[in-house]
Amino acid sequence: MYRTSRPEGSSTVVFPLWWSGRNKEASYQVLFPAFWRFSHQRENSEWTLATLFYWSRNGNWRTRGLVPIAWYSRNGEGSGTDALLPLFYEKHSPTDQMVLTLPFGFRKAPDGGWFYVPPFFYKDSWDRSFWMLFPLAFSHHDKVSETRTQIVPPLLLYHRSSPERSLFGALLLFWRHRDITSTTTLGLPLFYDFNSFHDRRLTMFLPLFVRYRSQVTDTSVAVAPLFYRRTGPTDSTTVLFPLVWDFRGGDRRSTIVFPLYAGFRRPTWEGRYIFPNIWYRTGLGSEAGTSRLLVLPFWESAVKRPGDYLWEVFLGLFGWERIGRNRYLKLLFIPFELSPAPAASTAWYGKPPPASHTRRMRGLDTRTW
């Protein structure tokens, strides 16, 4: 047995079973190993452990329990805890409550809360929210920066977005990035799309298709197997080799659909060929009102100038023509002149068709009721 006594405190030891001590602020008693008790007068606290039984006091908090299986605590102001481990744990206060169990759990608080039903978990607060379906999907939302993040591990999927930019990827094969000036889309290893807003865009599906467009110059080019197309503000070129050929520039255009059709447009005329033997031409501009039709070798008709007219059968075997007042009849390729038409009925020959104008009639309405 060992005992000491000093002004600041005393202690007693009966080795190895009993230990005790005391001073102005604290005291302890130990009956090894069954009983432990410690107290602190200045902090108004004490706790005691007697084998598996535990009780303590800390200020206005009181705790009782069976260590380490069950306990409960109360403070007399509506707050406390209850536990039966590992099955149940509960903590509450006048403004907060939390419950933890194996099949479910939740917490409610003024600034947010959370709950879980394994494998699902959800948490929400004033500045962010989070949920997961472990281990299949995860999602996070930062409400302050308006940033969202989603992850789906089985699909190797990642998505992060904000008002200024976003990034999306799946299976390490598909990626899409966006910001306020451009987007980039990749479908590896074949598809690529680069789009700079209001500037240019390049799209590729290798090796089948490539397209480039410039919004600054208003031009575009598209290329595919046996296909080519270029367009601009005043011209275009389209080729579907070897069947379709189309070239346009200003007031000129040539279109060929081999071997069935061909169309041509020039400043003064426009013509069309239809396989195998049809050609039709009409005048434009200064030659407006003229035309010619060939159905070789059966038929030919033409208007060489407004008011004139010609038709022939079998390349001139039979025919008839009017030129101004003069009229001709063709028999067996030989033309015969007929008597001219009266002058009054042919005064308008050779003049272009008058332009059509719609003009509003103006006047005074004098109707009365």
Image (cartoon, rainbow, N blue to C red):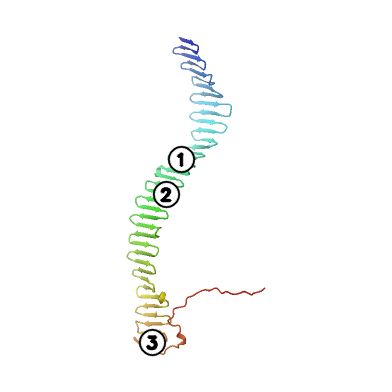
Q: Nearest to the eye among marks 2 and 1: give it.
A: 2
Q: Earlier in the sequence, mark 2 or mark 1?
A: 1
39 and 201: which is toward the camera: 201
Q: Residue at 39% across / 51% down in the picture?
A: 185
Cα–Cα span, label 3 and label 1: 95 Å
Q: Amino acid at mark 1?
A: Met
Give the number of the disc on residue 329.
3
Give the number of the disc on residue 132.
1
Question: Residue 59 location in percent, x, y?
Answer: 55, 23
Residue picked out by circle 2: 178
Q: Amino acid at mark 2?
A: Arg
Categorize mark 3 by other alpha carbons within 10 Å: few (<14), some (14-19), many (20+). Answer: some
Could you tell me how many numbered marks the image carries? 3
The C terminus - image quarter? bottom right
Q: Residue at 52% across / 33% down in the picture?
A: 99
Question: Residue 321 location in percent, x, y?
Answer: 39, 84
